[in-house]
Amino acid sequence: MDILKTLCEIIMEIMDVEGQTITAETYLVRELGAESIDLLELSVSINHHFHIAVKDDDIFLRNFRLFLVEAERLEKEPTSYLQERFPFLSAERIMEILTDLETGPAIKIKDLVSYIAFQRKG
Amino acid sequence: MNGPRDRRKGLILGGTCELALALASRLIEKGFFPVLTWRNPDGCGKIDAALAKLSGRYETGRFSLDDPLSLETLFAGEPGFDFLVDFAQGDYEALVASADEDRIPAYFSENVVARAILLKRLTREMLRLKQGRLIYISSSAAERPAPGHGFYAAAKLAAEALYRNCGLELAGKGITSVILRAGYVKAGRGYAFLEANPEIIRQVPLRRALEADEVAETILFLLSPAAVGINATILTLDGGLSAAKTGTTKH
């Protein structure tokens, strides 16, 4: 199953994104305007289509900033600390997010793809 | 009528209580398919005895709020509950200042925490169906507890809040909720209480307790498409008791 293709179909079905092109680099919140209820539906749909357990806080990187603050408080190296919390993200992707946080929610479609692939591997 | 399609398959939590059995009979008569939960084999037997003439038109399943495994079992089969009517409630009567400290966390874990997890699981299933109706059977004691009802009332109020928010958050996706606070009903523990305290009825403007079938009829209406606008709110079914100041119903 092509995860990205299926995921894009799910997003098109759930959200009002007519006319927008969705790629792995598309921002879920910043560009597509996903709200909390959309994320909930997305989570339910991912669970159903990919037969994986979905933890909403993880897949949508909800506590990313909280863990970043926690790493600073504990004097831990942020990237490795965050990678422990989000093992489905690569170190490169975490560094990318760290440079992108100030502009708003940094989650992209490719992060969801990473989560799904990670969960499917078990 | 432009409303959600008729809801057919429903989960009845606390399926062994008299009200649940009265409701199940009416639901089956109306073409619904209830799944009633029980906590122990005696409860299962009670359901089967009460619904003996309706065999094959309902199911039963073990479920206990204090047993996470039973939650897994409940959702292990073919999903698709169109509605939930929740009668389940553990009882713990004690003055707050004299409560057993070991029982307090267990009581709230069972009646609030486990219920929140159940609601999370169920509403996610309903989101897939894009419809669902949640009815929580609360009690007038949530609003007007007697001494000794502090934990019961606190658990009821917390559960009410969870149900209300489900309706608030998910109505746009076809899932609505309503809380029904029942007053004096001639059923179960209420019946025993009324037998022991017949004078209490004088405080009820209606001058009588409600019959189990009357409550079941009210729930049937709340499950109907016509009641979909009654969402994320609390209805009181107590014959007017909570509207009156104590001792002022005579004139």
Image (cartoon, coloured by chain):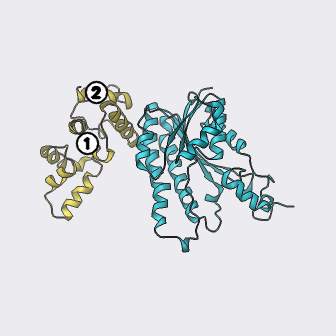
Across and down, in percent, residue B72 comes to 40, 42
Quadrant of the rendered structure where residue B84 is?
top right
Q: Nearer the viewer, residue B115 or B241?
A: B115
Could you tell whether B28 is left or right of B71 in the image? right
Give amino acid for label 1: Ile
* Chain of the residue that carries numbered disc 1 in the rendered image: A
In three-dimensional space, the C-alpha distance between marks 2 and 1, rounded to whole angstroms, equals 18 Å
Could you tell whether A92 is left or right of B160 in the image? left
Q: Which chain is yellow?
A: A
Is B152 rendered above or below residue A96?
below
Give amino acid for label 2: Thr
Across and down, in percent, residue B132 comes to 52, 36
Residue on which the image places disc 2: A6
Q: Residue at x 56, y 53 (%)?
A: B89
Mark 1 Cα-neighbour bin, 10 Å: few <14, some 14–19, many ≥20? many
Could you tell whether A121 is left or right of B28 in the image? left
SS type, badge 2: helix
Is B112 rendered above or below residue B72?
below
For chain B, the rendered hue is cyan
Q: Residue at x 41, y 49 (%)?
A: B68
* Chain of the residue that carries numbered disc 2 in the rendered image: A
Quadrant of the rendered structure where residue B229 is?
top right
Residue B135 in view of the camera: no
- Which label number is shown at residue A107? 1
Q: Nearer the viewer, residue A94 or B225?
A: B225
In the displayed orientation, state which residue is furthest to the bottom: B97
SS type, badge 1: loop
Residue A78 in view of the camera: yes
